[in-house]
Amino acid sequence: MKKTLFKISRMDCPSEENLIRLKLTENTNVKHLSFDLENRELLIYHNNGLDKITYDLGTLDLGEKLIHSEDADLNLEFDNESKTQAKLLWIVLGINLAFFLIEMTTGLLSKSMGLIADSLDMLADTFVYGLSLLVVGKAAKQKKKIAKLAGYFQILLAVIGLIEVVRRFTGIEQVPNFKTMIIVSILALIANSVCLFLLQRSKSKEAHMQASMIFTSNDVIINLGVIIAGILVLWLNSNMPDLIIGIIVFALVIQGAFRILRLSK
């Protein structure tokens, strides 16, 4: 058995971790994955087939770099806490799904494209966590089919959102309710922090469940962006800040969807 260390320069939140896990678990030579998000490192325990592992990582375009590869202890005891991990993932998935519904509803009621876009980002995270749970025990073909459906659905929702943003740019629209934007985004920021805290707390039990770099994760940045947009809406009495943050978030959702679609190839 070998253990190989990779530096993954663009792996800074649980979404990238789960995409990597989804991609590599279809390789029968891969026996165990150990993630260090804080240092953006991935340690892979595997049999032969390093070239295939390196190629698979490269398809995700996350800035992988091989650090070293060496023989591993054949008596290495891997942690056996899949039930605990699954419970944590279900909790995180539930929080993201709940806030997708909350932000979508309040976004529609308050006329805020920022909240609607942020809700789709929550839905994108729900897809990622859900995929990591749904593919357990399934064949590679089924994994790819699920990933493809999730990716295309995300793109469809984001494109619809972008079309609505363009429509609002070209028409006379009501200024969104800045109070709703700010309050709901603060709650979403707290929810994302709770998710990251729960995953980070599991670090001592299973490395791949850790989550750090809270302030650099896309979710937290987006939440802060919507809060700032709400303040600017109040200050400028204009819907332009809300539409701009909407475009940015929809673009991030589409970018994430294309990453998922790479898994279906």
Image: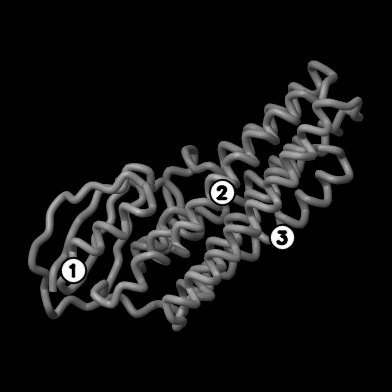
Q: Amino acid at mark 3?
A: Ala
In the image, 261 versus 83, the foreground residue is 261
Q: Along the polypeptide, which appears first: circle 3 or circle 2?
A: 3
Read off the residue under disc 1.
49
Q: Nearer the viewer, residue 107 or 51?
A: 51
Q: Is residue 240 above or below residue 28?
A: above
Q: CA distance from mark 2 to mark 1?
A: 38 Å
Quadrant location, the C terminus = bottom left
Q: Residue sitting at 71 percent across and 55 percent down?
A: 100
Q: Quadrant of the N terminus?
A: bottom left
Q: Residues within 10 Å of mark 3 (few under 14, many from 20)?
A: some
* Lateral position of residue 216 relative to residue 122, left or right: left
Which of the two labelled residues, at mark 2 and mark 1, occupies the earlier sequence position?
A: 1
Q: Are marks 2 and 1 in contact (CB under 8 Å)?
A: no
Q: Nearer the viewer, mark 3 or mark 1?
A: 1
Report the amino acid beneath label 1.
Gly
Give the spatial CA distance, label 3 vs label 1. 41 Å
Question: Left of 35 or right of it: where is 222?
Answer: right
Label 3 belongs to which residue? 98
Amino acid type shown at disc 2: Ser
> Which of pointers 3 and 1 lies earlier in the amino acid sequence?
1
Where residue 17 sits, quadrant-wise, is: bottom left
Q: Which mark is residue 193?
A: 2
Q: Position of residue 257 (x, y in %)?
A: 55, 52
| Residue 94 image position (x, y, % from top left) | 64, 65
> In x, y percent, where is residue 225?
64, 32
Asked whether disc 3 touches disc 1, contact meaning CB atoms under 8 Å apart, the reply is no
SS label for mark 2: helix
